[in-house]
Amino acid sequence: MPRAVGERGRARRKFGQHTSAPEPTACSSAQWDVVRAWAAEAAGLSLTEPQVSRLEAYVKLIRTWNLRMALVSRADADRLVTRHIADSVFAAAHCVDGEAVVDLGSGAGFPGLPLAVLRPASRVCLIESKAKKVSFLVEAIRVTAAPNVTVCHARIEAAANDDMHRGRYAVAISRALADSDAYWAAAKAFLAPGGRIISMRSAVQEIRREGGAVIEYRLPDGAHRRLVITRV
């Protein structure tokens, strides 16, 4: 059965404190300036100072935990802001504040956690099956002060068949999952009537489903991305 995870979860106590690790290098303020300007122009979102401060805390946490577990690749650790945060900002721009959103296979929390920071009236649920990543997500919710986010420790298929989640969301979003029949069946199960699936894709990934709106964009670091939005 899917398990909601609170701040005092056992996994957090095990993985939440890393006292012996060296302090990771902080992302420069110039990167945040670039992303803020890009967000306003490309995504139509103005990031406030409090929002940026919370996202900075999130990025710092990722870099700290990434020294001990694989949240992002080493290459991506240096472009968390201009790639991962920016990509999540673009996704947030296509969600309405107040909508219930489920992030399938959340991993390090992209795009769900930044989306929650930028859409504070939305209820966001992060579905993640790996215990260590669940531990990280619980701590990330704490450091970003995001009361509108919950974590569900479960496989996507199991959560999709649970009454607490089935048919409860306006948006099912994923950044990491393959475009498979199993993914589409599970994503649909989370949605209320009229809901939509948002699939975040690179330019080289094949789009298997027809009928969705395909939005092409480039991130501040030049990466070519696609957002595929399908109403079901």
Image (cartoon, grey):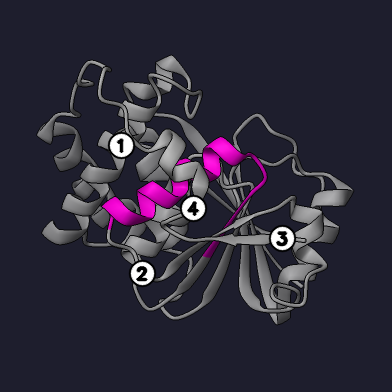
Magenta span: chief secondary structure: helix
Q: Position of residue 76 (x, y in %)?
A: 41, 23
Question: Alpha-carbon distance for marks 1 and 2?
Answer: 18 Å
Q: Is residue 136 magenta?
A: yes
**Residue at 19 percent of width and 48 percent of height:** 37
Q: Could you tell me the amino acid type at mark 2?
A: Pro
- Which comes before the other along the chain, label 1 or label 2? 1
Q: Secondary structure at mark 3?
A: loop
Q: Quadrant of residue 66?
A: top left
Instruction: Identify the residue under disc 1.
Output: 61
Within the image, what quadrant is residue 59 found in? top left
The answer to whether one can see residue 61 in this image is yes
Q: CA distance from mark 2 to mark 3?
A: 20 Å
Q: Any mark on residue 147, and which? A: 2
**Do tag 3 and tag 4 residues touch (Cβ < 8 Å)?**
no
Is mark 2 in CB contact (under 8 Å) with mark 3?
Answer: no
Between marks 4 and 1, how big is the CA–CA gap?
18 Å
Q: Is residue 103 left or right of residue 58?
A: right
Against 167, residue 117 (above or below) is above
Query: Circle 3 is placed at which residue position?
Result: 2
| Mark 2 or 3, nearer chain start | 3
Camera-nearest label, 2 or 4: 4
Q: Name the kind of residue labelled 3 in the image.
A: Pro
Query: Magenta span has 198?
Result: no
Task: Tell me: residue 206, above or below residue 38.
Answer: above
User: Which residues fall within the magenta stretch?
Assistant: 125-144
Q: Secondary structure at mark 2?
A: loop
